[in-house]
């Protein structure tokens, strides 16, 4: 299968590209603008793979995207490229509007032109839009899980732009019969995650002997999925997903931010030699570095999604337990300190 991945040099994208290349039958075209979170180093180990091609292209450059589609004639597009950090969307929303809304529009238009030019049977092609559970908004502690029929109620500029992308994708399926699928995933963690997200922030601050910032009282709850499980789900969607469908992808690993921070600190107490710390701060446990900071505006309390549809319709279920995933993640960052601090 020929597959074009946008944002393939980012966290989830690089893990997806690496998975896809495990099959010699797959040929991958990675399109990435290489902003701050997209790194060539994320795929350094596969740069010379004969089935891999990289292009530094902005997804808003519709003609360049169209020309790449004509050149390679992919059977599937995974559209992951996006601005994705909530804090950045609050301080600078414009980039999110441009990348997540207009970028998705240009990808859809380029794909529509491509299919009208070279594909006679659109059922053999899939455009998969990778979105987030944040489009559904926030839950209270005892609320039922979001499912694919839940209303979209985004509360940040980031989640609003991703929801807009979802609506665009649906409209192109309904209006133009574009063969699209949308996926909404819970919080990812694992190797290569850019160190502005919560888990790498906790690890980085701790091993540098710095205060670990936790918003509010740390009571916000998130469902965490190991990135390998997510990208395996995406691959299954590409193979068996039904055109026009939406799929939630979650692990049912709900944990409050403060409990997550304490768990990571406990793991680091066992794994990291405090004598290696550059800081002069004396403490017995990394948990002593946890500091509560002013909560961010509109901070959603809880995200949690029902994944029964993808479980039953496609046969996907997460394989990595939260305990194993956290340990693998911490081990990877400790083995790649230059990457973490770079």
Image (cartoon, rainbow, N blue to C red):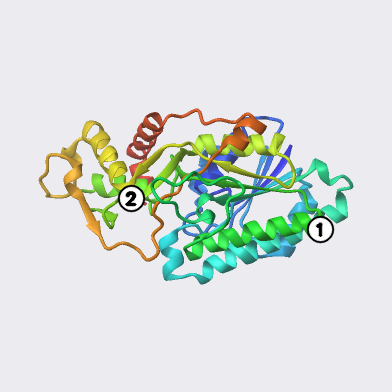
Residue density around tag 2, few if under 14, some if 14–19, many if 20 or more, within 10 Å: some
Number of numbered discs on residues: 2
Which quarter of the figure has residue 317? top right
Dot 2 or dot 1: first in sequence order is 1
Residue placed furthest toward the right: 120
Residue 291 drawn above or below residue 49: below
Q: Is 228 on the left or on the right of 78, as rendered?
A: left
Q: Quadrant of the N terminus?
A: top right
| Residue 68: % across, % down | 74, 54
Residue 211 drawn above or below residue 190: below
| Residue 292: % across, % down | 23, 56
Residue at the image point whose x is 47% and y is 58% from the top: 36
The residue indicated by pointer 2 is 201
For the residue pair 78 and 152, the one nearer the viewer reads as 152
User: Which disc, if any, is residue 176?
Assistant: 1
Distance (Cα) linking label 2 and label 1: 43 Å
For the residue pair 82 and 156, the one nearer the viewer reads as 156
Q: Is 289 on the left or on the right of 148, as rendered?
A: left
Labels 2, 1: front one: 1
For the residue pair 289 and 19, the one nearer the viewer reads as 289
- Mark yes or no: residue 56 visible: yes
Residue at the image point whose x is 41% and y is 57% from the top: 300
| Residue 320: % across, % down | 46, 29
Residue at the image point whose x is 62% and y is 49% from the top: 149
| Residue 312: % across, % down | 63, 31
């Amino acid at each position: 299968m020929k597959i074009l991945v946008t944002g393939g040099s980012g966290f989830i994208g690089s893990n997806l590209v690496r998975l896809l290349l495990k099959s010699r039958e797959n040929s991958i075209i990675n399109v990435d603008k290489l902003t701050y979170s997209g790194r060539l180093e994320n795929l350094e180990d596969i740069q010379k793979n004969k089935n891999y091609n990289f292009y530094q292209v902005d997804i808003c450059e519709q003609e360049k995207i169209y020309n790449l589609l004509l050149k390679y004639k992919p059977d599937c597009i995974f559209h992951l490229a996006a601005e994705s950090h909530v804090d950045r969307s609050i301080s600078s929303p414009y980039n999110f509007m441009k990348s997540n809304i207009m970028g998705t529009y240009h990808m859809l238009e380029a794909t529509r032109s491509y299919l009208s030019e070279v594909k006679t049977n659109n059922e053999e092609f899939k455009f998969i839009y990778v979105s987030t559970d944040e489009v559904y908004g926030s839950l209270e502690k005892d609320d039922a899980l979001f499912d694919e029929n839940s209303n979209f109620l985004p509360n940040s500029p980031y989640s609003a732009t991703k929801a807009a992308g979802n609506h665009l994708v649906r409209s192109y399926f309904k209006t133009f019969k574009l063969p699209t699928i949308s996926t909404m995933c819970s919080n990812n963690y694992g190797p290569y995650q850019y160190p502005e997200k919560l888990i790498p922030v906790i690890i980085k601050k701790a091993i540098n002997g710095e205060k670990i910032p936790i918003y509010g009282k740390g009571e916000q709850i998130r469902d965490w999925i190991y990135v390998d499980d997510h990208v395996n789900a995406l691959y299954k969607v590409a193979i068996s997903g039904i055109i026009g469908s939406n799929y939630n992808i979650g692990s049912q690993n709900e944990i409050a931010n403060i409990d997550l921070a304490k768990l990571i600190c406990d793991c680091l107490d066992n794994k990291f030699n405090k004598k290696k710390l550059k800081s002069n701060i004396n403490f017995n446990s990394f948990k002593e570095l946890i500091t509560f900071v002013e909560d961010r505006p509109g901070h959603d309390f809880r995200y949690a999604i029902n994944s029964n549809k993808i479980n039953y319709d496609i046969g996907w279920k997460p394989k990595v337990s939260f305990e194993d995933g956290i340990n693998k993640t911490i081990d990877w960052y400790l083995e790649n300190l230059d990457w973490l601090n770079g």
